[in-house]
Image (cartoon, helix red, strand yellow):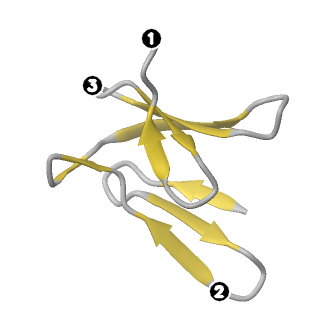
Amino acid sequence: MWFATYRDGVWKYDGIKITQYSIKEKSKQIALFSIYKDNKGDLWLGTHENGAYKFNGTTFEKFKNN
């Protein structure tokens, strides 16, 4: 189960332990707005001013539309 907080990152509960994933850019905590799991099972975060982030299995990386 995943939980997104506004200013304290994302938390994952696996049934035993809770893990925090801090979402930062240039050492500044990013304000999160939404969390979404797509049809492929990928987990996405929406932010107020910093675009989207995608979970790579270890951490959340900023999405870059090339």
Closer-to-camera residue (65/8): 65
Q: Using the image, tell me which numbered label, if any, was put on residue 33.
A: none
Q: Residue at x 40, y 57 (%)?
A: 9
Q: Which mark is residue 17?
A: 2
Does the residue at mark 1 contact the one at mark 3 (Cβ under 8 Å)? no
Marks 2 and 1: which is nearer the front? 1
Q: Residue at x 35, y 60 (%)?
A: 8
Q: Is residue 12 above or below residue 47?
A: below
Circle 3 sits on which residue?
Answer: 49
* For the residues bearing labels 2 and 1, Cβ distance under 8 angstroms: no
Q: Secondary structure at mark 1?
A: loop
Gap between marks 2 and 1 measured at Cα:
36 Å
Count neighbours of disc 2 (C-alpha within 10 A) and say few if under 14, some if 14 to 19, many if 20 or more: few
Where's the C terminus, which quadrant?
top left
- For this orientation, the residue located farthest to the front is 66
x, y (%) of residue 14? 74, 76
Q: Tell me the residue that label 1 is attached to.
A: 66
User: Left or right: 39 with respect to 23?
Assistant: right
Name the residue located 58 percent from the left edge and 47 percent from the top edge.
55
The type of residue carrying mark 3 is Glu
Secondary structure of the residue carrying numbered label 2: loop
Answer above or below: position of 65 versus 61: above
Residue situated in front as seen by the camera: 42 or 34: 42
CA gap, disc 1 and disc 3: 19 Å
Q: Most extreme residue toward the top, as rendered?
A: 66
Q: Nearer the viewer, residue 58 or 10?
A: 58
Looking at numbered disc 2 in the image, what kind of residue is underneath it?
Answer: Lys
Residue 17: quadrant of the picture: bottom right
Q: Report how far apart the C-alphas of labels 2 and 3 lie in the structure.
A: 31 Å
Q: Residue at x 84, y 28 (%)?
A: 39
* Whole-percent x, y for residue 40 in the image: 83, 33
Residue 43 appears left or right of 41: left
